[in-house]
Amino acid sequence: MELNGIGIWSGDLRFGEEGERHDAAAELEQLGYSALWIPDFGGDVFGALRDLLEPTSTIVAATGVLNLWMHTVDDVGKGFAALEGDHPGRGLLGVGVSNPLLIDQTHPGEFNNPLQVTRRYLDALDAVSVPRDRRVLAAGGPKMLELARDHASGAHPYIMTPEHTKVAREVLGEGPLLAPEQHVVLETDAARARAIARQGLAIYVPLANYQNNWRRLGFGDDDFADGGSDRLIDHIAVWGDEAAIATRVQAHLDAGADHVCIQVFTETERTDFPRAEWRALAPALVGLRPRTG
């Protein structure tokens, strides 16, 4: 699948009120965003993708990512086939192995070789006719990126930096899809913006699989303490006005990304969809493309 431009990554589009999910999806398509990415915590993830495709006509709906521990290969094959039958060419499966702190709760002792588990799952998707060009792999480290190159159509790194995007492109080579997610806070006050970013990143900063990838980028133990150092927060999230956010997204594109999906964070007291932020950012983002020459 060819995917470029800028997408929206949003838990609200999976778990928010149904009517607003439909309205938001239609508006995001009109604003010019090219894909809608939703998380997976089990349940009917294909129904959630269908909810985004039915009120739209061209936008891609993608999982970011389908947790391979929570869905049998046969169920994924059937779900994908039904979605493809109704909305051909518009579904993209991001697939991932999650992390041991979460998975050991439901599959104790099984998270001992995530690379092997993921390879087996991807090979099994071949057998149920989920095409490689319609799936990407949640990949951060070099071995998982190689697996994304060889057993999927590319990679969907999560909470990484433009420096990581450059490394990922080098591993993937030319051709495979590279679609990083970027945390965004549309706020110009540094203290407030970092506080909002820390709230959104709180569950990820302590996790070893993310820390291992950040260590490869030069971060260390001090950066992972107390919710994340300012240096870490400023690298894995971007805050500021529309121009500052556009600059960071462009940096991913210049480093080799084909598509960047932004995840907007607001203060936890807010329970509404961040539609005002999506609208404000659209003029600055939807026309961005990799620079050439």
Image: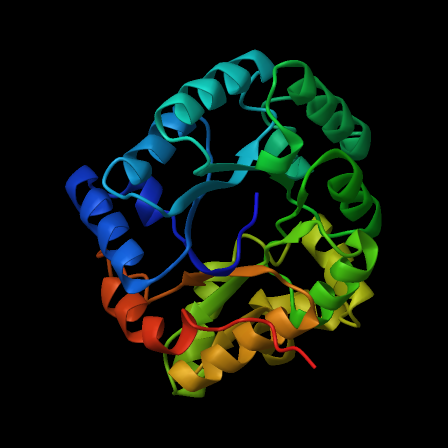
Asked if 76 appears above or below 145 in the picture, the reply is above
Display coloring: rainbow
Q: Quadrant of the C terminus?
A: bottom right
Report the residue at 59% width, 58% height from top: 180
Location of residue 136 in the rendering, given as x and y in whole percent from the top left corner: 63, 41
Report the residue at 69% width, 66% height from top: 256
Q: Nearer the viewer, residue 253 or 157?
A: 253
Determine which quarter of the picture holds residue 196.
bottom left
| Any part of residue 261 in sight | no
Location of residue 66 in the rendering, given as x and y in whole percent from the top left corner: 53, 33
Determine which quarter of the picture holds residue 55.
top left
Location of residue 48 in the rendering, given as x and y in whole percent from the top left corner: 35, 33
Determine which quarter of the picture holds residue 235.
bottom right
Location of residue 127 in the rendering, given as x and y in whole percent from the top left corner: 68, 14
Q: Nearer the viewer, residue 183 or 245?
A: 245
Q: Nearer the viewer, residue 1 or 232?
A: 1
> Along the horizontal axis of the image, is 25 left or right of 118?
left
> Along the horizontal axis of the image, is 64 left or right of 161?
left
| Any part of residue 24 in sight | yes
Residue at the extreme front of the image, as rendered = 293
> Along the horizontal axis of the image, is 7 left or right of 117?
left
Asked if 98 appears above or below 79 in the picture, the reply is below
Count all numbered tags in the image, as a single digit: 0
Q: Quadrant of the N terminus?
A: top right
Asked if 267 appears above or below 36 in the picture, the reply is below
Report the residue at 64% width, 44% height from top: 138
